[in-house]
Amino acid sequence: MKHILISRISSVILFFLFRGLHVLSRFDPRVKKEMERWPDGMTFKLLCGPKGPGLTMSWSGGGGLIRRKNTCPAQITMIFKSPERAISVLTGMAGISQAYAGHYFSLEGDIHSAMSFVRCVEITEAYLFPRIMTKRILREVPEKRMPALAVYGMILLGL
């Protein structure tokens, strides 16, 4: 029962994370600049444990981020060792730096590209989480370039 709840919560958070990244890839110049460095077709996969939910997305230069099935191969794969470790990062209880230091996940692929992805995720977290949480989990809280409410609105409307 506990794993089902964690999986559902993780799936919802991954939905918002993808949509947030998608919105910010068009409207936040830092995220846009970071993603424009990625080669066309670059695919990232984030898995919440070996059997947990995941998020797979590809960068398509002109088309932005595209969500893919988790069975799609990826150049960068981050696999959390357990759904509990994943949920602690996804809910903002632990930052990605803490997760890396604590060996919460394994990384397959180029670490330079993975760090680029992490920078985009951290900027997205600054929009999606309240400042009190981001101050605790991020080394430096990125400045918002647009109102968080506008980002949430676009996320919910699928823009």
Image (cartoon, rainbow, N blue to C red):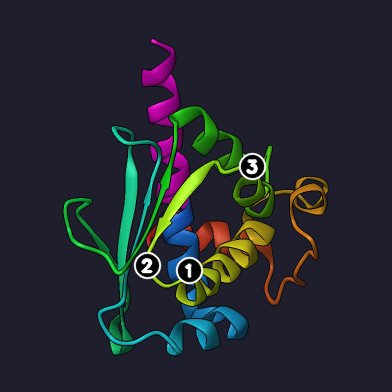
Residue 12, magenta (yes or no): yes
Q: Are marks 2 and 1 in contact (CB under 8 Å)?
A: yes
Residue under the point 39% across and 29% down: 8
Residue kind at label 2, given as amino acid type: Gly
Percent x, y of residue 33: 54, 88
Percent x, y of residue 10: 44, 36
Residue under the point 46% across and 82% down: 35
120 shown above or below 51 = below
Structural crowding at the residue carrying mark 1, measured as other residues with C-alpha within 10 Å and reported as few (<14), some (14–19) or many (≥20): some
Depth check, front residue: 93 or 108: 108
Q: Based on the displayed image, in which of its 4 quarters is residue 48 positioned?
A: top left
Residue kind at label 3, given as amino acid type: Gly
Depth check, front residue: 116 or 109: 109
Cα gap from disc 3 to disc 2, whole angstroms: 19 Å
Residue with the mark numbered 2: 109
Marked residue nearer the N-terminal end (2 or 1): 2
118 shown above or below 130 = below
Numbered tag placed on residue 102 in the rendering: 3
Q: Write down the region rendered in magenta.
A: 1-16
Q: Based on the displayed image, in which of its 4 quarters is residue 67 positioned?
A: bottom left
- Secondary structure at numbered mark 2: loop
Residue with the mark numbered 1: 114
Q: Are marks 3 and 2 in contact (CB under 8 Å)?
A: no
* Badge nearest the viewer, 3 or 1: 3
Marked residue nearer the N-terminal end (3 or 1): 3
Residue kind at label 1, given as amino acid type: Ala
Residue under the point 75% across and 57% down: 138
